[in-house]
Each structure stands twice: as C-alpha cells, then as structure tokens.
Amino acid sequence: MANQYPGPPPEQPPGQPGQNPYAAQPGGPYAEGAYGYPTAPGATPVYGYPQAAPQPQPYAQQQPQPAFAALLLTLGDIAVNGDTIVSPAGPMPLRGAVWTATDMSRTEERIPPHAIVLAILFFLLCFIGLLFLLMKERVTTGFVQVSVNSGGRHHSTMIPVQSRNQVVHVLNQVSYAQSISM
C-alpha cells in the first residue's frame, strides 16, 4: 500500500493524456474481437461470446407410470380412489366401509357493529335509523367430524367450516361416500 500513485505506475512510459495506459496497443497481438472484446489469434471463443447451441440429446426411454384409479372423493385427509380408501391410518377397502359425519359447528346470529353505528347516526332522522337494527348477520364456526371404519381400521378427521353451505357440502360428500361403499 506504500507504493500507490494517483496515475500510472512510474515504470510505465507516459502515454497521451486521457488514454488508458493498460489498453492493448492497436494492431497488437490482441485485436478487437466481436462486441469489442479482445481475443487472442486462433483462440476459441469463451463464455459470453455468441456461438451455436449444442445439439439436443435424445430423451431416454421413460418407464410407463403405474396406473392408479381415479380420485373420486377427498374429505380432509381421507381420499377415496377406485375401490380403496386412503387415510393416514393406512389403506382400507371401500366395500363395506362405515362412514359417520358429526356436525360440531355452531351458527350465531347477531347485529353487526356497523348497523349499530348507523342506527345511532340516523336516530335523529325520524327514527329511521332504528331500521338499521333489523340487520342481522350469521356467523358459522366449528368443524364437521368425519369418521370411516373399514377392514379393521378406523380413522377420524376434523374438517373446518365457516358457513352453513360448507357444512352441507361436507355432509353431501359423506352421503356420496356411503353410497359408493355399499
């Protein structure tokens, strides 16, 4: 660090002002290549230079995939495909399976907070604001428990629901599973 100079090193012959002292001499051994990059005479292009793309290799012969039955139904982590029920408890036969669904959700009906605010704001206008208190909202929370018992195995799963439509959908799926397991 002691021999730092603001310009070119003192052992280099001075060049013209504004000229790069480290640049190759014009017509020297390193002529300008494509895109202004220097290349040595007879050298092969290196990374970054345009060149022909390699020829694509033929694909290896792939082994055929094993045939699985189509997925008929999914209830949480229980899947029904073909004649098998697949669950974390292991595969179970579909024929003779006993399905059980328990609705453990609850639905609350309440006056939303914005209706109370609007009723207070419009109370002074001929009691019309009291009509906002007639607004109701229904909020469903909870789970539907689905259990399946077949082939000496049992598995139960909890499916979260946020509306009555989701509860009905899960119960209809269980009904379909019961109909195909007979």
Image (spheres, rainbow, N blue to C red):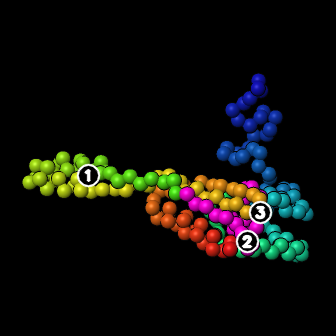
Q: Does residue 51 appear in the picture of this structure?
A: yes
What residue span does the magenta drawing correspond to?
78-102
Q: Residue at x 72, y 30 (%)?
A: 5
Badge 3 is on which residue? 151
Badge 1 is on which residue? 115
User: Is the magenta region chiefly helix, strand or loop?
Assistant: strand
Q: From mark 2 to mark 1, how far is it between C-alphas?
A: 53 Å
Quadrant of res 40: bottom right
Q: Residue furthest left?
A: 126
Sequence order check, earlier mark of 2 and 1? 2
Residue 64 percent location from the top left of the image: 85, 75
Give 51 or 63, whichever is nearer the viewer: 63
Residue 144 percent location from the top left of the image: 55, 57
Q: Amino acid at mark 1?
A: Ala
Residue 6 lies, with reference to residue 81, above or below; the image says above
Sequence order check, earlier mark of 3 and 1? 1
Q: From mark 3 to mark 1, how far is it between C-alphas?
A: 54 Å
Q: What element does badge 1 sit on? A: helix
Classify residue 121 as left or right of residue 171.
Answer: left
Sequence order check, earlier mark of 2 and 3? 2
Nearer the observer: mark 3 or 1; the answer is 3
Badge 2 is on which residue? 95
Q: What element does badge 3 sit on? A: loop
